[in-house]
Amino acid sequence: MAWERSGVPGGQTRTSWFERDLPAMWRLLENQQSDDHWRLVAGWRKASELTATHLRRLEQYRTNLAEAWPPDRNAAASAYVARLDFLIENVRTTHDVAAANYTTLSATVGALASARRDLKPLYDEYVATSGTIEYYSNRAAFNAGAEAPTVIGAAPAGPQDLERLNNRARAIMYTLSHTLIEAEAAIRQPPRTQPETLGTQGMRTFMGGSNQWFATLRASCLERIQQGGWTQRADALAGCKRGTAT
């Protein structure tokens, strides 16, 4: 992700923020606009929603099929229901991963945006205070070298004021670091599954039902469900329900 490339600490980085001042911390977040990150979050949300929809459709199709073609009474029906169970389990696993990653990344991007928002006024104050300190220092040096020095008063700010701002910024960055480390550990990888086959004997049984056309139709539907994309699978299932398959 962008924050990993930018140097904002994740699981691989244990940054000691006490070694950095506020300008250095701000440089890490300055270009961390959250629009791209939120698009990534939206992608996981969409994946979660789509897989949830297709999971419900697959489960309903299995229920309808089992009622119309009881698997406990027919070997071909049992083989086809077993295949549907396999597909349902894979879709459910993918949905669980997408939902978990959406939740994790949503919280993480929110934390990043919040840290950037909270750090900006501290950075502005740091810059203003640094300017005040520099101005007073230059004025004091000039006054010390003048033939008739004047009273310029006490310094309006000093290094202790900058350090106070540094510490407030460090608290923000340590909180963000902790969130990113937790997120890196929580992110789940989508499962990799090998397509399950019915096997020669299973396919022979499947195709050997009392109604050859009925079995061929379901084999065609199964192939479309396996090979189609997410948006195509709904059409494949709808075609199976209507009794049409190409």
Image (cartoon, rainbow, N blue to C red):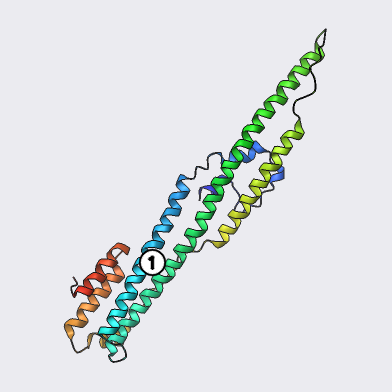
- Residue drawn 64% across the image and 37% down it: 122
Residue toward you, 203 or 214: 214
Residue 190, image quadrant: bottom left
Residue 127, image quadrant: top right
The quadrant in which the C terminus is found is bottom left
Badge 1 element: helix
Residue toward you, 26 or 197: 26
Q: Position of residue 35 (x, y in %)?
A: 46, 45
Kind of residue at disc 1: Ala
Q: Position of residue 212 (x, y in %)?
A: 18, 85
Mark 1, residue position: 52
- Residue drawn 27% across the image and 73% down it: 223
As drawn, the residue found furthest toward the top would be 147
Residue 181 higher or lower than 128, as above or below:
below
Q: Is residue 82 left or right of residue 139?
A: left
Q: Position of residue 239 (x, y in %)?
A: 21, 71
Q: Position of residue 189 (x, y in %)?
A: 48, 64
Residue 182, image quadrant: bottom right
Tell me, yes or no, if residue 197 can be seen here. no
Tell me, yes or no, if residue 102 can be seen here. yes
